Image (cartoon, helix red, strand yellow):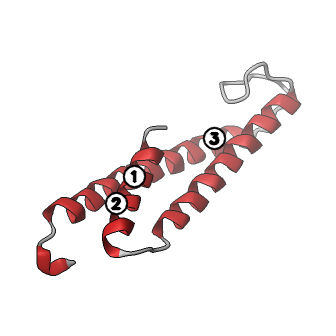
Amino acid sequence: MSVIPLLTLSYLAIYRKKGLGVELAYWGLTYAALSMGVLGIGLLQSHAGCTFLLGDCYQSTLPAWLWGFKIVFSFFLMGTNIVAVLTVARNCRKLFLSTKSDS
């Protein structure tokens, strides 16, 4: 949860210094797609009768493929957050280590 505000602040600082861009919009679309995926998993689990929306569920009505999908989805979420942290570091490097001639 802390990656999104850091990403937003780093891009706002970049945009303030170098002008507007579309990079933050792409990150917003990525996190919107991830949140729809989490919502879909939660809806499938609640429809199957699970008591927890995102935790482990051992209902017999749960589709068998959902377990593999949850694993792949969690790796995708982790990878997205790692790339976002690296992007924040790159943006901070651009902000604080750029010379006057880069502006």
Closer to the eye: label 3 or 1: 1
Q: Residue furthest top?
A: 51
CB atoms of marks 1 and 2 within 8 Å: yes
Residue, x 44% and y 53% (percent of image)? 8
Residue occupied by mark 2: 13
Residue 95 in which image quadrant: bottom left
Nearest to viewer (mark 3 / mark 2) = 2
Q: Residues within 10 Å of mark 1 (few under 14, many from 20)?
A: some
Kindly identify which residue carries mark 3. Answer: 70
Residue 9: image tag: 1
Numbered disc total: 3
Element at label 1: helix
Q: Amino acid at mark 2?
A: Ala
Mark 2 surroundings within 10 Å by alpha-carbon count, few (fewer than 14), some (14 through 19), many (20 or more):
some
Which residue corresponds to the image point at 65% horizontal and 55% vertical from the top-left? 33
Q: Amino acid at mark 3?
A: Lys
- How many angstroms separate mark 1 from mark 2 (CA)? 6 Å
Labelled pair 3, 1 in contact (Cβ < 8 Å): no
Provide the secondary structure element on which disc 2 rests. Answer: helix
